[in-house]
Image (spheres, coloured by chain):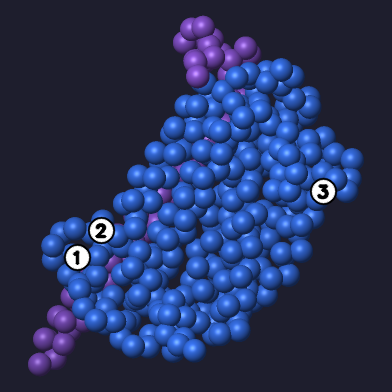
Amino acid sequence: MNWQWFHRLGSPRWFYEKTDAWIIWLMILAWGLLLIGAVWGLGFAPMDAKQKDSYRILYIHAPVAFISMACYYLMAIAGAVGLIWKMKLPYMVMKSAAPIGFAFTLIVLATGSIWGRPTWGTWWEWDGRMTSYLVLSFLYLGIIALQNAFQSRDTADKASAILALVGTVNIPIIYKSVDWWYTLHQPATLKLIGKSTIHPSMLYPLFTMIVGMYVFFTLALILYTRTEILRRESKAQWVKDLALDISSKGDLSKGSLPKGNLPKEENA
Amino acid sequence: MKFQFESLDAFITMGGHGANVWASYILVYGILIYLTISPLLAKKALLKQQKKLLQLQKKSQDANL
């Protein structure tokens, strides 16, 4: 079996060059969907019979919640790939995912709290869903802290990957917390299996926001990973060429690579 | 599909929930803008620093020759 594609996937330079053209399109698509979804959800989706207009927070709260959990899985998988195959790029992806996931988890906690006040009459309750989400934010913080706790990059990556893998146990707990314990949080309205309990007029803008948020997450992860690649590969000749080439053109914002052939194996 | 509010004022106040709804959206979109801009600025700073370093190295090499 030809494993060339897999080795290429592990090449930071290949990733940097490949993603250069994607950024602008991902930016247009993500921000386009997020703006359409927000206008639709805020102004055109019908009012909820029980929660009135406060339910419109759903259009940002739920998509961000999906991403914050998916981001954790992605981070753990990247860590596992790094540990097993000793590849550099997955570790860079893992490190880049942590601050994005932490920001998204903070958004979920904050918007949930703002939504909870008019709906439940409280900003915070130590119930299953909210507490497990708080634990998720601590896990992300732990990974960010571990990345900065060691002088050796290799040790920091391995320690972070192990914590990321151990922490995956929290994701099913978050997901099932509304079924396992008595909680203020409502059960899932969007279901992969079975019928969703949300009206299509409310579902379509929500779906737009979910897709937009996934595209945005892809964009943010690529941007953070590209910066991390430059940071870690600063001694590589191609990064030096890039710095001199871009600086001489005065265009520091784009950061395209000078065109040339990729080395066969950059994943040592 | 029609606009659900009778006036701009009703859209902003959202039946008394406007503060909660708008605060949430402003917070989220503010963080999303930060997540877009901060890696671009970090990359710009990194490349600038790298260029300075390379120029210093070149100067030092020229001085030694």
Instruction: Tell me if A166 is positioned left or right of A245 in this view.
Output: right
**Which is in the foreground here, disc 2 or disc 3?**
3
Q: Residue at x 17, y 70 (%)?
A: A245
First along the sequence among labels 3 and 1: 3
Mark 3 crowd level (few <14, some 14–19, many ≥20, 10 Å Cα): many
Evaluate whether residue A113 shows in this view: no
Host chain of mark 1:
A
Host chain of mark 2:
A
Q: CA distance from mark 3 to mark 1?
A: 50 Å
Observer-nearest residue: A166 or A51?
Answer: A51
Q: Which amino acid type corresponds to the residue marked 1 in the rendered image? A: Ile
Colour of chain A in the rendered structure image: blue
Q: Secondary structure at mark 1?
A: helix
Q: Which amino acid type corresponds to the residue marked 3 in the rendered image? A: Ser
Residue topped by disc 3 = A177
Observer-nearest residue: A12 or B48?
Answer: A12
Q: Which amino acid type corresponds to the residue marked 2 in the rendered image? A: Lys
Residue topped by disc 1 = A246
Q: Residue at x 89, y 45 (%)?
A: A181
Mark 2 crowd level (few <14, some 14–19, many ≥20, 10 Å Cα): few
First along the sequence among labels 2 and 3: 3
Q: Secondary structure at mark 3?
A: helix
